[in-house]
Image: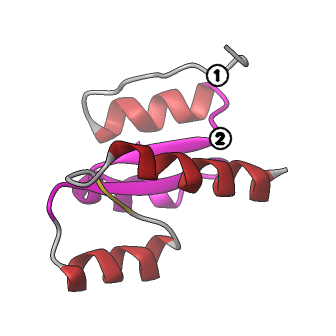
C-alpha cells in the first residue's frame, strides 16, 4: 500500500541479475544463497533460516548484522525490515 513490492527469484543468478537492474531496499535470502548476494551493492541482504540452531543464527547475525528465524512468528520480521529501511535513509 505504500509502494513496496515483492520480487521473487528462483536462484542466486536470477537474483543478482534483478539486483543489477532494479532497486531493492532489502533482500531476504536463504542462508546458502545470501553469501553470493551479500557483496552486491545496494540492498541489505537478510538471511532467512528455518529452525536454525542458536549458534547458527548467531553466526548469521554476526555476518549480516541481521538474520531471521522463519520458524518463529512471522511478525517478528517486521521490526527487522523497519530497522533496515530506516538505516538506509
Residue depicted at 64% across the width and 52% down the height: 41
Decide which of 34, 49 is in the foreground and name it: 49
Query: Do residues under tags 1 and 2 come within 8 Å of each other at their CB atoms?
Result: yes
Q: Determine whether 11 is above or below 7 in the image.
A: below
In magenta segment, residue 43: yes
Q: Determine whether 39 is above or below 82 in the image.
A: below
Q: Determine whether 76 is above or below 13 in the image.
A: below
Residue lying farthest to the right in this orientation: 89
Q: Which comes sooner in the sequence, label 1 or label 2? A: 1
Q: Does residue 59 appear left or right of residue 43 in this picture?
A: left
Q: Determine whether 37 is above or below 10 in the image.
A: below
Decide which of 76, 30 is in the foreground and name it: 76
In magenta segment, residue 55: no
Read off the residue under disc 2: 25
Q: Does residue 79 appear left or right of residue 53 in this picture?
A: right
Magenta segment boundaries in residue numbering: 22-51
- In the image, residue 11 lies at what x, y percent? 26, 34
Mark 2 crowd level (few <14, some 14–19, many ≥20, 10 Å Cα) = some
Badge 2 element: loop
Read off the residue under disc 1: 4
Decide which of 36, 6 is in the foreground and name it: 6
Residue depicted at 57% across the width and 53% down the height: 79
Residue depicted at 73% across the width and 19% down the height: 2
- In the image, residue 15 lies at what x, y percent? 41, 34
Q: Quadrant of residue 25?
A: top right
Q: Quadrant of residue 8?
A: top left
Residue depicted at 17% across the width and 68% down the height: 52
For the N terminus, the quadrant is: top right
Amino acid at each position: 500500500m505504500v509502494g513496496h513490492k515483492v520480487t521473487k527469484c528462483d536462484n542466486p543468478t536470477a537474483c543478482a541479475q534483478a539486483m543489477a537492474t532494479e532497486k531493492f531496499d532489502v533482500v531476504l535470502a536463504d542462508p546458502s544463497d545470501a553469501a553470493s548476494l551479500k557483496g552486491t551493492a545496494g540492498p541489505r541482504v537478510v538471511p532467512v533460516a528455518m529452525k536454525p540452531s542458536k549458534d547458527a543464527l548467531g553466526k548469521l547475525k554476526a555476518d549480516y548484522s541481521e538474520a531471521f528465524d522463519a520458524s518463529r512468528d512471522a511478525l517478528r520480521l517486521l521490526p527487522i525490515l523497519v530497522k533496515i529501511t530506516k538505516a538506509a535513509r
